[in-house]
Amino acid sequence: MRSNNVLGFIFAGTLDEKIPELSASRTMASVPIGGKYRLIDFVLSNMSNSGINNVGIVAKSNFLSLMDHVGSGSAYDLSKRRSNLTILPPYGGKTFSNYVETIYNMHGYIENSREEYILISPSNVVTNFDYNSVFDFHSKNNADITLIYKHGVVPSGYDRPLTLDVDENGKVKQVFIKLETGDDKVNQFYGSVLIKKDLLMEEIRNSLSLNQLDVKRIIQKSIDKYNVYAYENTGYSAAISSINDYFEFNMDLMKKEVRDELFNPKRPIYTKVRDDAPSKYGLTSSVKNSIIAQGCVIDGEVENCVLSKGVYIGEGAKISNCIVMQDTKIGCNTNLNYVIIDKDVTIKDGRSLMGFDSYPIYIAKKSVV
Amino acid sequence: MFPKQEVVAMLLAGGQGSRLGVLTKKLAKPAVPFGGKYRIIDFPLSNCVNSGIEAVGILTQYQPLVLNEYIGNGQPWDLDGMHSGVNCLSPYQAVDGADWYSGTANAIYQNINYIDRYDPEYVVILSGDHIYKMDYNKMLEFHKEKGAACTIAVIDVPLDEASRFGILNTYEDGRIYEFDEKPEHPKSTNASMGIYIFSWKELKKYLVEDEAKGNSSHDFGKDVLPAMLDAGEKMFAYPFEGYWKDVGTIDSLWEANMDLLDPNVTLDLKDIYSRNPMMPPHYVSSDASIQNSLVADGCNVYGNLEFSILFAGVTIGKNATVNSSIIMPGAVIEEGAVVQYAIVAENTVVGKNAVVGEKPEDVTDRDNWGITVIGANTVIGENAVIKAKEMIESDTEVTANEK
């Protein structure tokens, strides 16, 4: 199977409800992350770098920021004569809370595309992954369906996630629903599936005709009927399912091995570009263990922070363990610890805000403190 | 058929820029990196776009590969219109022969067809080696108001520096009566900025006439402008206020970069567009210390940085010190190395504990002090010492023993 025979299909609203603060004005896919990115940049770049030419993004609600961010798809090299990025807003004005009806609702787009296969993906996973390995694996095993999974502890935001029992050849023996989350390591399936389009639509139609809308059940039952295989993503991957996951991932970027893997120059992560100047450090600045995007002006002290584009840190400010989103202004002599500060916020001179490791405070977009 | 454009800009980018030495060994001067993420040409190009000029021809000749690649389809500058935009114009072969661009005026002469396609009223001639922000519209308004055939932008320079520039002597209303190229005893302080607006009809006439002259060097400053003045054309000097710097020499290139760190300098980088490398935000480690510097995406800073400019993807190792220097994309300064008053070009590696450049106060004979320059893709070996004012070739390796 060649990658240009695979249609990319991304759900923009994966677990929106689990990060109500960040998704108040946006969908999961467009949550700002890692200083200059939005969550969807990772899966889109992975698809583009793997040679997928056409990608559809199912948008359910609050997708203005998503449309603004991905635009025509040119930043991901997905806006050419034979490659396209398409945002799929609710068709016929209908939105559905289950995947079966959502996919059926988009059957026109899926069936009209020229690709034979479809790669379905959530938008909340941060990883740098080459899908070609999955395509090869799928062909080699004559699989009907390949599920992509990660071995590890299930992030706390997932309710009853699917886990896979996989044999040594990668064949799925059983699919379980995990009832309680804990510290045990399992093969968690996040929702990335490779399947022939015809087969997918046939299953979706059958399920609808039987009023079977529970996608977990459908996947469980599919192993009786089909050759279902599973492919492990053994690299770094972080699924964002809560504000704590979000905080932890941003802090993970301070680790060199994580940065080296995620930002592999051979498979760059693309994003919408803004013409910011390089960041300017003043005479009174002191920055330690931090990730800084361009366009920042830093005159204060910053430690263990992720600063997005165009952030201003005033003189005498002490900012630690914070995630600061774009164009936020933090005044002089402020003191902030464990705070997640959304876009365009103004923190006035002299203010203090203290969260805690396990409970970072969140300051909403455009607030003035 | 091309829709008419009132103004077409022609950017002279063909010169070698030999005074920049190893920095222009493999690329044209306008493509030299500047200010942490830009190339020099971003300034005139962005000025064009911000002045509403939609048709820009870039005249290339010397080492055009990097420049052509960088300009590409012009999209970063919004110059990728359907019927206008940016074009790189290199010398070409025609039925009646082929010729290199023999001078600035000849370069425009050879592209009369390109300009005529747009049927413009005015042509702006720009050079690719100046750092400044300017609204060409204001200058064009002045040009129209005066009913000029040619308007030349001038900047007020200190009297003691005036003899380094081309000085324009004018009447009170700004009309030029004399050109004074690098005068020993300047009569005024109006230095030409190398920015000309011509009414196209007039310019075309003089270009054709100049081309026919056997003894002409086909240069705007030496031939075309004096010819126009002699013929009694209305030529005006347009006074510009703001930051402007010719970055044609190592010293001036270094100074212009350092000016970006000076709060008293008025140049800001807002609305200057460039091609952006796809790199993650930069990382500053717990051991690092950064003061008064510019740092671009993709850098990893583990050492000490003062009064310096880091381009995209630069690594500064632990306990390394970089002071008053410009480090171009992808360069690596390894652990314990010292780089001071230097320009380190792209992808060069300065090995562990090597010392590049010297502080002016540490050099006894001030005449021997200067900015140290290391060419691109060079390896400076461990413990090697490179003195002030030295220039190391690109694509070479220097070991401590050789020094």
Image: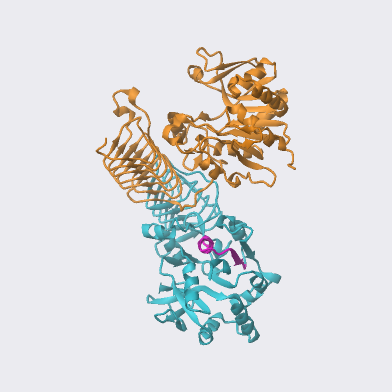
Chain colours: A cyan, B orange
Going 50% across and 32% down the picture, which residue do you hit?
B16
Q: Can residue A259 be seen in this view?
A: yes
**Vertical placement of A84 versus B17: above or below?**
below
| Front residue of A27 and B128 | B128
Q: Is residue B174 visible?
A: no
Asked if the stretch drawn in magenta spans residue B276, the answer is no
Where residue A155 appears, x then y in whole percent? 44, 71
Tell whether B353 sits left or right of A104. left
| Front residue of B307 and A235 | A235
| Part of the protein shown in magenta | A39-60
Where residue A139 appears, x then y in whole percent? 50, 75
Question: Dividing the picture into quarters, in which one does residue A204 lie?
Answer: bottom right
Asked if the stretch drawn in magenta spans residue A54, the answer is yes
Q: Residue extending furthest left?
A: B401
Question: Dividing the picture into quarters, in which one does residue B341 lie?
Answer: top left
| Front residue of A15 and B220 | B220
Tell whether A338 sits left or right of A17. left
Question: Dividing the picture into quarters, in which one does residue B391 lie?
Answer: top left
Going 42% across and 48% down the picture, which residue do you hit?
B313
Where residue B390 appears, x then y in whole percent? 35, 31
Where residue A43 appears, x then y in whole percent? 52, 64
Going 43% across and 64% down the picture, which residue do you hit?
A359
**Vertical placement of A127 versus B254: above or below?**
below
| Front residue of A298 and B334 | B334
Q: How many marks?
A: 0
